[in-house]
Image (cartoon, rainbow, N blue to C red):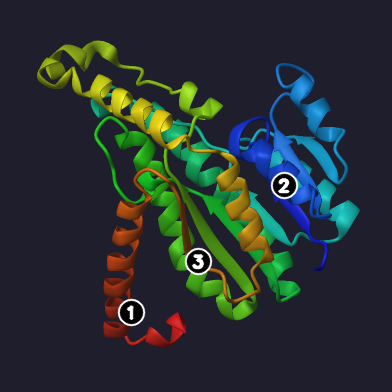
């Protein structure tokens, strides 16, 4: 297996933390990004940086200059990039109307625009070498917009839209774009849910005020019964890296609880997607 240069975002915890270690264990050179490695993430950065094949970079993904500086360091050291894993993300829970335009902008900046910023930087190098892999970590909520996760889901819908169209546009250049759709997992992200900045509308939703608690109870039961392991997501990323170029699926669902529902939706949409592109006369791009 060829050793690859792999950039992974959001490695201070959860899926990113596990993915960085899993990929490095295969001998690939991993550049792991997180924020504030001299401050709140200092211990995590030190621990991850001590692992063979991992270099930790301090990157604020919503800061274009910070991203450019980090990317240039990788290119200066390695000359190229082979795999980009856009894992970093934030989540929001609550009545959608409590979110201000600024809240939505923030969600899109982190979950959609930041991944696109990195894709734009990586693609020229991947196309030049006629080989590359972009993995965007989305969510089951990238397929369904659930009540109380509306703003978060919108950002994942947007990420999936970027990924799906790009998947077909760049495939002839030797670049694969893949989406990983995790379900609910007990990670730090699930424990750090953001809320809308406008609580004043809360009283208008008293009729459904008990539903969020029902959702949390159901998710808790999924954790208890299914015991989902975040390592499964890291393993899915590793599998995509190991899969030969051109054979990687567009979407990979990683969800032991409700994944069969997401998979069924993916299959149904794929059938109709083919029909749409056929109607537009570009069905050859699907092959």
Asked if the residue at tag 2 contacts the one at tag 3, i.e. Cβ–Cβ closer than 8 Å, the answer is no
Q: Which of marks 1 and 3 is nearer the N terminus?
A: 3
In the rendered structure, the answer to whether residue 147 lies left or right of residue 186 reads left
- Please state the horizontal and vertical placement of residue 140, each as a whole percent of the image: 38, 47
Disc 1 element: helix
* Residue behind mark 3: 166
Element on which disc 3 rests: helix
In front: label 3 or label 2? 2
Asked if residue 239 is positioned above or below residue 231 in the image, the reply reads: below
Residue under label 1, please give it.
277
The nearer-to-camera label among 2 and 1 is 2
Report helix, strand or loop for mark 2. helix
253 or 118, which lies in front? 253
Looking at the image, residue 234 sits to the left or right of residue 194; the answer is right
Identify the residue under disc 2: 22
Q: Using the rendered image of the protein, determine whether residue 99 is visible from the camera's viewpoint.
A: no
Dot 3 alpha-carbon crowd within 10 angstroms: few under 14, some 14 to 19, many 20 or more: some
Measuring 82% from the left and 68% from the top, which residue is drawn there? 2
- At 26% from the left and 23% from the top, the residue drawn is 212
**Residue 217 sits in which quadrant?**
top left
| Picture quadrant of residue 183 | top left
The span from disc 1 to disc 3 (Cα, nearest Å) is: 14 Å
Image-based side of 156 in relation to 78, left or right: left
* Residue extending furthest toward the left: 207
């Amino acid at each position: 297996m060829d050793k690859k240069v792999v950039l992974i975002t959001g490695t201070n915890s959860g899926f990113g933390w596990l993915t960085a270690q899993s990929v490095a264990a295969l001998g690939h050179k991993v550049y792991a990004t997180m924020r504030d490695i001299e401050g709140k993430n200092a211990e995590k950065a030190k621990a991850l940086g001590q692992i063979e094949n991992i270099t930790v970079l301090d990157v604020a993904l919503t800061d274009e200059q910070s991203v450019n500086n980090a990317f240039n360091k990788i290119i200066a050291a390695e000359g190229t990039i082979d795999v980009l894993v856009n894992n970093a993300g934030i989540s929001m829970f609550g009545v959608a109307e409590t979110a201000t335009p600024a809240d939505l902008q923030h969600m899109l900046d982190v979950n959609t625009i930041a991944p696109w910023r990195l894709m734009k930087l990586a693609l020229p190098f991947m196309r030049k070498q006629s080989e590359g892999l972009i993995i965007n970590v989305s969510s089951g909520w990238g397929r369904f917009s659930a009540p109380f996760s509306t703003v978060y889901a919108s950002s994942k819908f947007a990420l999936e839209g970027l990924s799906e169209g790009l998947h077909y546009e760049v495939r002839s250049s030797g670049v694969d774009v893949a989406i990983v759709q995790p379900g609910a997992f007990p990670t730090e992200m699930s424990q750090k849910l953001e809320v809308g900045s406008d609580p004043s509308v809360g009283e208008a939703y008293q009729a459904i005020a008990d539903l969020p608690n029902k959702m949390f109870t159901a998710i808790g039961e999924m954790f208890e019964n299914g015991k989902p392991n975040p390592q499964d997501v890291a393993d899915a990323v590793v599998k995509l890296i190991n899969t030969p170029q051109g054979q990687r699926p567009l979407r990979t669902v990683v969800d032991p609880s409700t994944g069969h529902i997401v998979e069924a939706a993916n299959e149904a949409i794929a059938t109709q997607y083919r029909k749409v592109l056929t109607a537009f006369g570009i069905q050859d791009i699907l092959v």
